[in-house]
Image (cartoon, rainbow, N blue to C red):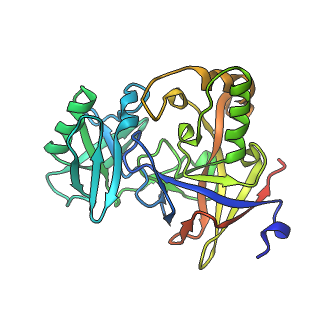
Amino acid sequence: MNFATEHDLSGTLHGLFIYPIKSCAGIAVQEARLVESGLQWDRAWMVTDPEGALRTQRELPRMVLIVPALVGDELVVNAPDMPELRLPSAVPAAGERDTRARVWRDTVSARDMGDDAATWFSRYLEVPCRLVRFNPDHRRIVDPDWTGDVEAVTQFADGFPMLVTSTASVDDLNQRLSGAGEATVDARRFRPNLLIEGIESHDEDRIDSLFIAAQDEIVELRMAKPCTRCPMPDVNPDNAEVGTQVNAMLRQYRQDPRVNDALTFGMNAITLQGEGQVLRVGQRVGANLSFD
């Protein structure tokens, strides 16, 4: 397939990111398998309060300094001035660890990761915590108002399997920040799963279908919904300091009428074709635009 001639836009997959523990630091990876719920291992774990409600950077910005890694068959977790925490990456067996967890308005089936993990997160975040693993037997359905006739699922993500944005969109924001005398930021502020290079700033807003030239099959993603933005882009991922400059700048040019003038940056995506394929940095990307 000639992406340059068969699609409205063409580019490359510049970055891939997974966030094993919701609201903690992400991992830049060179490849990731596309599974039904998005990228493998993405938002598979979540920190909750003792009653099962999610904890996030919105209230606990130091969560951004919690760095997970997948090493062999273990989830390895580090944070400043904390001992390393090692946990099995496999889903705990059903039984006494069965629990329920709440992601905003959704209550889902989960498995508790045990008292050692709870103690570690409670100590670091200085509030009572549990760590839970999504139960893969549970189907958390994405809002059909945005997915149409496609039944998409996700794990502990806010609402959709994947987030797509572009290097040009981040560059555009940085030009505006620099012009206002503010420090520039990088894509980590927006927690994308896929970062596209070679398209114009915010072209992702106008994409209908995104095609990726995987090894065995063309992957097709649908851009489902603009990603509305909370205060998290103002959390510095290097030191957890909370500012105001990012959202203040977005208010000047990113109020989106498709979501009641909320601030948006990037697009939430679902899979139409290609489950099981491995996405790799550098793969060719093509896109068709929506002119609705």
Is the residue 7 above or below the residue 253 in the image?
Answer: below
Q: Which residue lies at the image location 23% right of the left edge and 46% below the top edge?
A: 99
Residue 271 at what x, y percent from top left? 59, 61
Toward the viewer: 152 or 290? 290
Is the residue 16 above or below the residue 3 in the image?
Answer: above
Q: Quadrant of residue 254?
A: top right
Toward the viewer: 245 or 153? 245
What residue occupies the far bottom of the structure in this picture? 216
Residue 210 at what x, y percent from top left? 69, 60
Q: Is residue 50 visible?
A: no
Toward the viewer: 264 or 170? 170
Residue 72 appears left or right of 144: left
Q: Which residue lies at the image location 37% right of the left edge and 27% below the top edge?
A: 60
How many numbered marks appear? 0
Q: Is residue 19 visible?
A: yes
Residue 186 appears left or right of 250: left
Q: Quadrant of residue 220?
A: bottom right
Is the residue 102 above or below the residue 89 in the image?
Answer: above
Residue 151 at what x, y percent from top left? 55, 58
Residue 45 at what x, y percent from top left? 34, 48
Q: Quadrant of residue 259?
A: top right
Is the residue 59 above or below the residue 285 in the image?
Answer: above
Quadrant for the N terminus, please: bottom right
Residue 142 appears left or right of 225: left
